[in-house]
Amino acid sequence: MIKKNVWYATIAIVFMSQLSNAQQKDKIYKKGWIDFNKNGVMDVYENPKEPLEKRVNNLLSQMNLNEKTCQMVTLYGYKRVLNDSLPTSKWKNEIWKDGIANIDEQLNGVGKGGSLSKNLIFPFSNHAEAINTIQRWFIEETRLGIPVDFTNEGIHGLNHTKATPFPAPIGIGSTWNKKLVLQAGQIAGREAKALGYTNVYTPILDLARDPRWGRVLETYGEDPYLVGALGTQMVNGIQSQGVASTLKHYAVYSIPKGGRDGTVRTDPHVNPRELQEIHLYPFKKVIHDAQPMGVMASYNDWNGEPIISSHYFLTELLRWEFGFNGYVVSDSDAAEYPFTKHQTAPTYEDAIRQVVEAGLDVRTNFWQPSTYLLPLRKLVNEGRLSINIINERVAEVLRVKFRLGLFDSPYVLDTKNADKIVGADKNQDFVLDIQKQSLVLLKNEGNLLPLDKNKIKKILVTGPLATEDNYMVSRYGPQELKNTTILDGIKEYLGKDVMVNYVKGCETIDANFPESEIIHFPMTAKEQSDIDAAVLEAKENDVIIVALGEDEKLTGEGKSRTSLDLSGRQQQLLEALYATGKPVVLVLINGQPLTINWANKFIPAILEAWFPNHLGGKAIAETLFGDYNPGGKLSVTFPKSTGQIEFNFPFKLASQGAQGGEEGPNGYGKTLVNGALYPFGYGLSYTTFSYSDLKVSPTKLNSQAEIKVSVNVTNTGKRSGDEVVQLYISDKYSSVVTYDSVLRGFERITLKPGETKTVNFTLQPSDLMLLDKNMKWTVEPGDFEIKIGSSSEDIKLKELITILP
């Protein structure tokens, strides 16, 4: 009995102790403010009415070295680095007991953690509550209570299980639709906010200048103006929801030598003028127009200097010239690379010193934070790194946290709301719309498309991508959605009206890939048999729809290509199907331009679908059969051969011209194939458009005046359709060699048959600027040609203007 009473008494004491601790913690939450440092007084940093800089400086003055450095490192989420899904008593002994800058990808469903803590990932309200629990630990259990920035990927929809997916970024770029991208950003930001994420790593502003590079699919395209315009909309959309947007990958990351990715990612052959005019343009534009709160520094070097340890890139350009006022986070391993890869630092500690002095605020890596924090503190304690530099870096992180409102409202206030607004099922109309708008019609000989289901009895759907769906799921996007493949989409669309047959035909690769990219190997008996089976079935059908290209295993991060031809036995399958004499429609699934010269010459209809989202099959079916009229445009040039690379837009005058004629002074020849297979801005429609009444005002002006441009566009066909009206500028004469033309405006419009719309543009002085001989931005006097067209090559109307001296 005595033992029982003692047991009850012990339980009571423990309970009362826990209750007392809870009550003590609750006391920090005051009316209108939070007592983060638990001293019972409203400090300046705790006062929502104080100016931001005063709050930052006040907090910084109270921080010790351990607390400061903890704001300079990322803790990767559950089962990436963090071993716990939720706080435990052991956390009081971990290095983050003094706080942490951010926690990345916590419980987002990716990796091992996704299978071990499903209940904390979905339903969505459980995730919001889990984030609140973690945030509460950092606020209540650390000395100064500095909130955490919860970061996550989001390049084609928020990287969380069952969130709303978009097409791959190259597909988003092909929409050429600023309002649509703004809406996509709003959805991603709204979902992030509801789930507890406070910072989304998107958009990618890298330019796809070399189509061999594996991450072409993660870019919006090759042109700096287009990428900058769409990137601005994505940032505006995300940050309108009260979360940060982090740009990546800064800078000159997307054009490593030979397009090689993976362990390479170095030695971009980019001159200083091209660096400024092409690769830095989107970052400068987006930072100026949208004020993103984050920038991710890249792995690579430029001109012999790693970007991550370059004061020129991270401070002089980014902050002093571009006006960036957020915080800089490293791409994984980038902070270590001055020592381990670039060998510009003799020790790991010196690499840390270099990157911090250059302007890196937060190290991100799949390592324990201590691997960075301990040597960082050692550098300061030994006098090899100034505490003043540390203060600058920490202040840059704290400013973002204050701007995000984390010191005023650090928690998800209504966790149940996440179940109401997050998820692909809440945005089905948008998901389908953005997917349709990303489709690009490359060829439609004889108006084969759209197919008339009333005139077709049997259709063969074939090809290795017809039933594949791995390209719909990305490491950087939503997971665990029900994917509609091309075969599924066509079957669901046609129902019982048309018999849909399926034979695979071949795999995306053969047994000798990738060596078969450079050496021809005879087909195996199995490969021949698979093609024969497809041909046999094709002869019994009225129309053939063949899905070819690349799947997730063929392109993406670390997966650059040696060749851009159809891999494996796909070309042989296509030629065999064509030989049947039946109408063939080619649907391309791919992450980069492919050199489909034979298909372009012989196959009557080709639809570019890139890497679609989970409703890709539905969108493709509705397009093939005419419920939707494709209006997307290519945001990258399709070369005819890898031997042409680089072949892209914009390009310097005469740099992509033909060989000289016999009368030329420098020799002549007929030794190469020239021109684009499909140029930048190209895309067909099921209808036709005419352009008229171009007006430019004024035509003679001073260098700082605005220019108004308008043009009428008419749908001259029999179907409603979208047209992307594109504005290009050519500098007729200049002090330095300029580009043949540059994109400086675009609008996607929808027109009914016979309808005319007036499209208006306003050009700013910056749209006419060039870098002069002294590398100074200026508008030079002289003549400029304003060109309006349907692609970079299909120019409809022109007008000359003159900038006066």
Image (cartoon, helix red, strand yellow):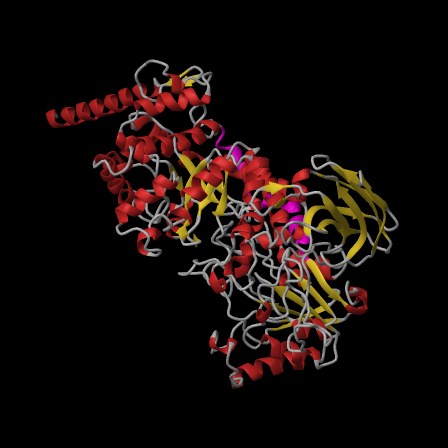
> Quick check: can you spot residue 343?
yes
Residue lying farthest to the right in this orientation: 754
Residue 650 painted magenta:
no
Taking depth in this image into account, of 660 and 602 the one nearest to the observer is 660
SS majority, magenta: helix
State the residue in front, 323 or 732. 732
Q: Which residues are magenta?
A: 414-439
Count numbered badges in the picture.
0
Q: Position of residue 603 (x, y in %)?
A: 71, 73
Instruction: From the top left corner, tell me how far across and down residue 686 is, in percent.
Output: 79, 59
In reply to whether residue 428 is colored magenta, the answer given is yes
Is 555 placed left or right of 696 in the picture? left
The relative height of residue 82 versus residue 611 in the rendered view (above or below) is above
- Viewed as shown, does residue 758 lie left or right of 587? right
Residue 461, position as x, y percentages in the image: 66, 70
Residue 83 visible? The answer is: no
Q: Residue at x 27, y 22 (%)?
A: 21
Query: Split into 4 quadrants, where in the image is the N terminus?
Result: top left
In the image, taking residue 272 as reference, residue 462 lies left or right, namely right
Percent across and percent down for residue 590 are 58, 63
Image-quadrant location for residue 698: top right
Residue drawn at x 36%, y 32% is 394
Residue at coordinates 73% horizontally, 59% vertically from top-left?
793
Above-or-below relation of 638 to 629: below
Q: Quadrant of residue 671?
A: bottom right
Of residues 504 and 802, the one nearer the viewer is: 802
